[in-house]
Amino acid sequence: MQGGPLDQLIKRLSSLPGLGNRSARRIALHLLNRKDTLMLPLAEDLQQAAEKIRECEQCGNLDMRDPCSLCSDARRDISQICVVAHVSDLWAIERTSSYKGLYHVLGGVLSALDGIGPEQLNLRPLESRAALPETQEIILALSATVDGQSTAHYVADRIAREGLRITHLAHGVPVGGELDYLDDGTIVTALKSRKVAG
Amino acid sequence: MQGGPLDQLIKRLSSLPGLGNRSARRIALHLLNRKDTLMLPLAEDLQQAAEKIRECEQCGNLDMRDPCSLCSDARRDISQICVVAHVSDLWAIERTSSYKGLYHVLGGVLSALDGIGPEQLNLRPLESRAALPETQEIILALSATVDGQSTAHYVADRIAREGLRITHLAHGVPVGGELDYLDDGTIVTALKSRKVAG
């Protein structure tokens, strides 16, 4: 309704994931009330990140360095590669600080609906990495959805070779999860994979 | 978890209203996957808007011009001034295309809790505008909250003079609202302000 740069800013903000027109307007006003402390620094952050952050050619992670700080960290266990769909999944696993191996970001999962075939995924570099003699285990950490699981099967087929362990994340009751609220599929899987107590 | 510009961008995004850590991470990844089509244009939009958009000295609206395009529009009725708390309220009224007078943006409402007194509001210019001979009506379009209504009373006291009509928005059942879901206060007000049918 103002025309010009404000309209354009609101339109651009509203195209971001999770934001609509109303939240974009709210954010634009918030920014305009804090031009020097938030709006211009944010513009600078965007430019800096766009310029400096790139994809690691080895694993597909986003970092300032290539190879990324995970691939080039000598303390990490190079015998394990954890395959994830998105960088956000890598971040989720890193936040747990429970995994010390390397990663490989596919950039998505196979999806007939979205027209994503094997060529659209970062698969060829994974094949080369899986074929390296130091690689002993590939952990397929893909979502427990139909697309995620069919991608896991496909990837497992492509990288299979003698002496390579291919594993996937355990399925079961989420920690803190109440049985009453769980879907049947999870309960069936958790029952089948039950473990001896103690 | 990446350190450097990406972390900083996510932190800055998560400080925007309505965004948390998770949505900021999601937006940052979305932007990094669209550097040239979205990320850099957004940085440019932010800079352009920060540079060009300013507050209208007369009414407090945000625009590229000062006085703003509403204040300088000769087709608008200068005998009416609609007083709103925020620019977003002005936009909301403008979207209805049902009001053709001028506006005055207070920049907030009186609030003892938030420490906002009369000095923090854009009140003095409103007094001058209300005192102009061409001003015949001041519409107090403030929220129907305690703070909004006490601000309306205070503003009405400050600008009162002979020959000046001071009005406020009608209270009642929202169009499309179901009685069953309305609070008691609204029903009482709507009953008291009932009108002859037809």
Image (cartoon, coloured by chain):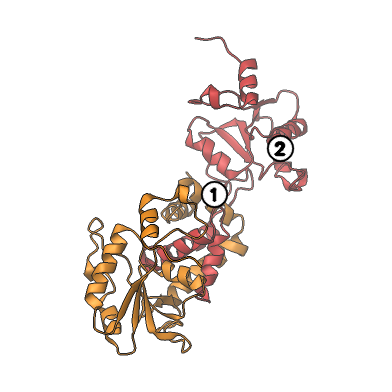
Chain colours: A orange, B red
Q: Nearer the viewer, residue B9 or A186?
A: A186
**Residue B99 percent across, percent down from the top left:** 53, 31
**Residue A1 percent across, percent down from the top left:** 47, 43
What amino acid is labelled 1 in the image?
Answer: Arg
Question: Which label sits on residue A151?
Answer: none
Q: Residues within 10 Å of mark 1 (few under 14, many from 20)?
A: some
Q: Residues within 10 Å of mark 2 (few under 14, many from 20)?
A: some
The chain that hosts pointer 1 is A
Q: Nearer the viewer, residue A159 or A12?
A: A159
Q: Which residue is mark 2?
A: B147
**Residue A15 percent across, percent down from the top left:** 41, 54
- Mark-to-mark CA distance, 1 and 2: 20 Å
Q: Is residue B146 left or right of residue B39?
A: right
Instruction: For mark 2, give the secondary structure.
Output: helix
Q: Nearer the viewer, residue A128 or B185?
A: A128
Q: Is residue A170 visible?
A: yes
Q: Is residue B172 left or right of residue A124?
A: right
Q: Is residue B34 left or right of residue A152?
A: right
Quadrant hosting residue B87: top right
Residue A75, placed above or below residue A18: below
Instruction: For mark 1, give the secondary structure.
Output: helix
Q: Is residue A44 visible?
A: no
Q: Nearer the viewer, residue A77 or A162?
A: A162
**Numbered-mark total:** 2
What amino acid is labelled 2 in the image?
Answer: Asp
Residue appearing at x 31%, y 79% in the figure = A165
**Residue A41 percent across, percent down from the top left:** 56, 67
The chain that hosts pointer 2 is B
Question: Which label sits on residue A26?
Answer: 1
Quadrant hosting residue A149: bottom left
